[in-house]
Image: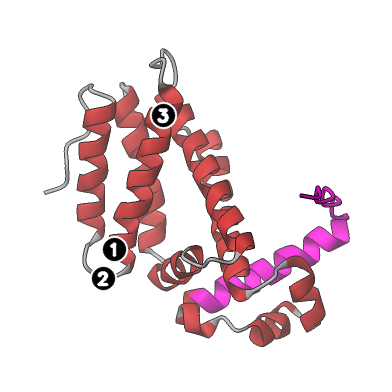
Amino acid sequence: MADHPAPRALTRSQQARRQRVLDAAMALGLEGGYEAVQMRDVAARADVAMGTVYRYFTSKDHLLAAALVYWVEQLEDRLSQAPPRGATAGERVLDALDRALRAMGRQPQLVGAVFAALASPDPAAVECQQQVATVMERIITRAIGEPHPPDLGDRARILGHVWYSALVGWVNGWSHLGRVHDELAVAVNFLLPEPVVGAST
């Protein structure tokens, strides 16, 4: 199998155009969910040509999945500036994940749109799934802090999976954010067996 050439780094102006496209897609998703994000409308709102949109994103699903990557990277930045609070690893992890839940609760249409895109078989969207998992694992690992268990990576990865699957239930309408929090609290208690913030009532 032939090796694919490494992607070239974007120039500053290219990065700005790509970000405008992402911002436009997120604004449309926030307003109307998955169906409201149409590539032609994204191009118009971002004030770029259609070809520019497809230069950076192979499909609508790739674009929306990339929006979630951007969102979790922004969450990581915010948590680095205002670290999660708590006396124990479990409390800090739950605080970090709860911040993500609160932010998502304020924009359910957009969250539904990006989670629909993450289910796509588009290889570019699948790559974004992996990027989201990597960032979430990093967030959880930093929240655990020191001292950490020897299998830290495994525990952080499993908590990231629970976070994702619990959110799918909320996005699909058969769960609610309180239940998502409760499921995360149960997982944290199993994987980081220290006193943690109690489940919501």
Tell me the crowding category of disc 2: few under 14, some 14 to 19, or many 20 or more residues within 10 angstroms, Cα based: few
- Which residue is located at x 54 percent, y 41 percent? 134
**Is the residue under label 3 in contact with that under label 1 (CB below 8 Å)?**
no
How many numbered dots are placed on residues in this image? 3
Disc 2 secondary structure class: loop
- The magenta region covers 1-29
**Residue 8: x, y in percent?**
86, 51
**Is the residue under label 1 in contact with that under label 2 (CB below 8 Å)?**
yes
- From mark 1 to mark 3, how far is it between C-alphas? 25 Å
Residue position for label 2:
173
Question: Can residue 48 be seen in the rendering of this structure?
Answer: no
Residue 166 forms part of the magenta stretch: no
Q: Compared to 167, does 144 lie above or below?
A: above
**Residue 55: x, y in percent?**
79, 70
Residue 12 forms part of the magenta stretch: yes
User: In the image, which disc is placed on residue 27?
Assistant: none
